[in-house]
Structures are given as structure tokens and as C-alpha cells.
Amino acid sequence: MRTRRTTSSSNSVPRETDLHPSVLLHEVVDALELTGSETIVDCTLGGAGHTKAIAAKLKGDGKLIGLDADPAAVDRARRALKNAQPRVLLSVSNFRHLRRTLETLKIAAVDGFVFDLGWSGYQLVAERGFSFMADEPLLMTYGAKDAHVFTAYDVVNNWEEESIADILYGWGEERFARRIAKAIVARRELKPIATARELGELISHAVPRFYARAKLHPATKTFQAIRIAVNDELGALNDGLSQALISLAPKGKIAVITFHSIEDRAVKRLFREWQNRELGMATTKKPIRPSTTELSANPRARSAKLRVFQKN
């Protein structure tokens, strides 16, 4: 679900079904233990894979609510769910505004929430600068540009070198954070860094040769860190999960799929805090990982982890 050299460098046009294969699909549906009449919220529609699988388990008296900050994702879900049996309510909204969205939709209590934190292949072709191999404006924004305080362009062209290095190390776990930050500042003194490809190539030349030739593209962690900063992903995650707990019905569940260690630690820490407050408990001691069969069909699922919390 993260940017990889093999994905972003392809010249072929991907089929829509290939852009966002749903990870841990059966595991998520099984974890929710659906009987058919529940109210379920998919907080990250993406390609609507999880949403469709949940809809297939719900009956006419069930409710399925879907959110996504990207209007295109909501449109995809609307097409995918046009014949769904349960009542379907879709909203263009970031899950950090979950409570407000549910109030607008007049949803009082929810039996299950799903958060799939992997970003989809649709975003690689959205022309927002997510792919370091594309001549696209440096935005890295989810949804509307004007809904963000700053863009990736602002980060690389206006932020102080120390601030850039800090986010690359803290949110990208980039070992050459200071080296890359120094190269960014030196380059922008000559001319602004305007496209994702420019930034990707700059990073490739800034790091040691062995790192540039590694299987993982050397710009991957930097792009991850900047994307997290632009979209305040960790703040949104904390807000969304906290609001989900408030709206969760007794015995209801929150299922979260993460794709890198920073997200997973944040979810694990929050679930542990809730458990210590005796609000409920994590249903498994260790996160659920993709099966060997799934990894064979979708290697990019290898970093996925599913954690589930059940309210008392």
C-alpha cells in the first residue's frame, strides 16, 4: 500500500480492479462478527473492497456508512454499492470529523468501525505528487487542496532544514534524514523544487550509492514523512479513533489496518490506554498478519497489521 519503485515506474495503465486490492479482507469481516442487522462505518472507502464485503454480510435492516476525504473514492463506492441490500450512506469527509459526520447522518450508535490506513493505487494516478517517478505538482494532499494548511511544495521549499530533517526522521524513520534535508535546501536555493520527480531524483543523488540501489526506492520514506505531515495523518488517526470509541455501541468493535510501524505503535498505544481504563480490550494479543496465500497474490500487503478493539 506504500509507494514502491515497481509500481510508480510502470508505463502501463492499471485496471481499476488492480489499483487497490483490499488487504486482510476476510480477516476484517470475520473480526466484525456480523449477523446482518448491524450499523457499520467504513472510515476509509478507498477502492470500496472492504465496504462491498461488509455490505454482502448485512441485511435490509442493516446500515453501512462510508467516509473518505477523496470525492473520487466516494463516487467509486457509490457505483460499487448501488445494488447493496443494507441502507447505504456515503459522505465526503475525513474521519477526524467522524462525530460531526455521524450526527449529520443521524447515526447515534455504531456496531463496528473499519479504518484501512493504507493509501491506494488510485492516489498514484491522482496527479497530486504521491509518486516520486511522476512529473506532477508537489501536493500530496488528500481531497481538496484548500482544505490543507500547507502542501508538500511548501514543506520542501519553505521549511527550515532542521524541521525537514526532523519530520523525515520522526515520521519516515529515514536514516539519512539530515543528509536529504541539506540537499533539499541546497537545491531550492538555485530554483524551487516543483515536481515529485524532481524531489525523487534529488533524494536518489543525495543518499549513499548502496542506499540508492536498494530494493526500496530511496525516496519512499521521505515521501511517506512529507505526506504524513501534509495531511496530519497521526493527528487525524488519534481524533478518528477517539471519536469512534465514543460512538461505539457496547460490544462493538474497531478494526484498524496499519502499514508502517509509526501507525501501528500509535494504534497499539491507544488500545492499551483504553484497556487500562477498562473501556474494553484488544481481541488479540498480537496483530493479525496477511496469510501466505494473500502475500503470494499481493506482495505489497506484507507490512499490513490488523488490530481489533472491542468495547465493554
Image (tube, rainbow, N blue to C red):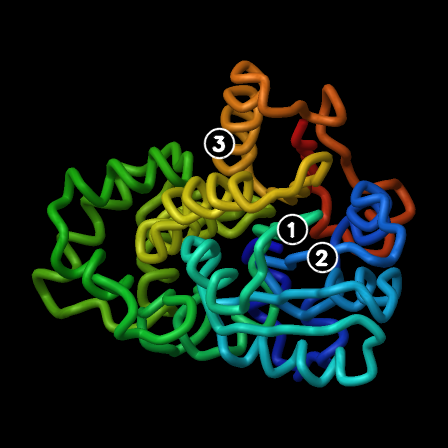
Q: In the rendered structure, are the residues bearing label 3 and label 2 in contact, judged by CB atoms less than 8 Å apart? A: no
Q: Quadrant of residue 189?
A: bottom left
The residue drawn where x is 11% and y is 46% is: 160
The residue drawn where x is 55% and y is 39% is: 245
Which residue position holds label 1? 110
* Mark 3 or 1, nearer chain start: 1
Q: Residues within 10 Å of mark 3 (few under 14, many from 20)?
A: some
Towards the viewer: 80 or 185: 80
Query: Label 3, label 1: how many angstroms apart (C-alpha)?
Result: 23 Å
Query: Label 3, label 2: how many angstroms apart (C-alpha)?
Result: 26 Å
* Mark 1 or 2, nearer chain start: 2
Task: Please identify the quadrant where the N terminus is shown.
Answer: bottom right
Q: In the rendered structure, are the residues bearing label 1 and label 2 in contact, judged by CB atoms less than 8 Å apart? A: yes
Which residue position holds label 2? 39
Q: Amino acid at mark 3?
A: Ala
Q: Assign a secondary structure to mark 2.
A: strand
Q: Which mark is residue 48?
A: none
Asked if residue 300 is positioned above or below residue 76 in the image, the reply reads above
Q: Quadrant of residue 137?
A: bottom left
Query: Label 1, label 2: how many angstroms apart (C-alpha)?
Result: 5 Å
Q: Which mark is residue 266?
A: 3
Q: Amino acid at mark 2?
A: Thr
The residue drawn where x is 50% and y is 79% is: 71
Q: Residue furthest left?
A: 189
Q: In the rendered structure, are the residues bearing label 3 and label 1 in contact, judged by CB atoms less than 8 Å apart? A: no
Q: Amino acid at mark 1?
A: Val
Task: Please identify the quadrant where the C terminus is shown.
Answer: top right
* Mark 3 or 2, nearer chain start: 2
